[in-house]
Image (cartoon, grey):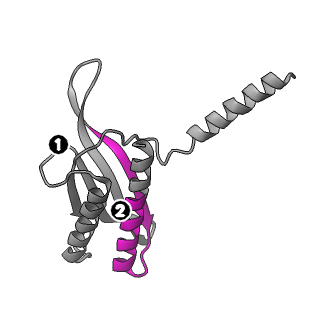
Amino acid sequence: MSNIKIIFITLFLLFFVSSLSAQTPFMLTGIKSYYPVVELNTDKIDIKYQEQILDMLIKKSQKLGIETKNFSSRSLAFLIGFIGVGDTLALKIELMLGENAIRLDTKESVFVISYMNSRIFVPQELEEELIDNAEELLDMFEAQYKEDNL
């Protein structure tokens, strides 16, 4: 094999591998505003944690320069609730960005999930682990937002 072919193949593989390093399959380009939401789908978590997570969400958004004060048809939401895993009760926490989009073929407006990341875990110390996992999901969102908006 000639040196040019080896260099070409090496460059191609480097480009291919670097494209695999995205945080998720979603794209966060062009997001300038959204409406922040925290939904607790359980009465086993004190409402004060809903407010604390919402505050974390708003602060992270401000740090990224994303507007959250005015209503937007796009929402960034934490959905938190318990699910059964066999005989065990696990906490499921999801961070998702939902918005309206227009289908290209029918020009119909549909609601889509344009970002999603989640965790399922069996909490030992519910409140502490809830806040830690919410923080980690927000940090992953921040990292991808920065990466997608270089």
Examine the rendered structure and indicate whether residue 51 appears above or below residue 67: below
Q: Nearer the viewer, residue 91 or 25?
A: 25
Residue depicted at 26% across the width and 55% down the height: 77
Considering the numbered disc 2 on the image, is that residue within a helix, a strand or a loop?
strand
Question: How far is mark 1 from mark 2, CA to CA?
Answer: 22 Å
Where's residue 58, x and y in %? 24, 61
Which residue is identified by label 2?
93
Dot 1 crowding, Cα within 10 Å, few <14, some 14–19, many 20+: few
The three-letter code of the residue at mark 1 reads Ser
* Magenta-span inclusion, residue 138: yes
Looking at numbered disc 2 in the image, what kind of residue is underneath it? Ile
Q: Is residue 113 left or right of residue 11?
A: left
State the SS at label 1: loop
Q: Identify the residue shown where x is 46% and y is 46%.
A: 24
Give the answer, above or below, for where 36 lies relative to 130.
above
Q: What is the quadrant of the N terminus in the image?
A: top right
Give the image location of residue 75, x and y in percent: 22, 49
Sequence order check: which comes first, mark 1 or mark 2? 1
Residue 14 location in percent, x, y? 67, 37
Q: Nearer the viewer, mark 1 or mark 2?
A: 1
* Residue 109 counted in the magenta span: no
Residue at image point 27% right, 64% down: 59
In the picture of the structure, the residue carrying the numbered disc 1 is 73
Question: Where 82 falls versus 111 (above or below)?
Answer: below
Q: Residue furthest bottom?
A: 125
> Magenta region: which residues?
112-139
The answer to which image quadrant residue 28 occupies is top left
What is the x, y in percent for residue 150?
43, 43
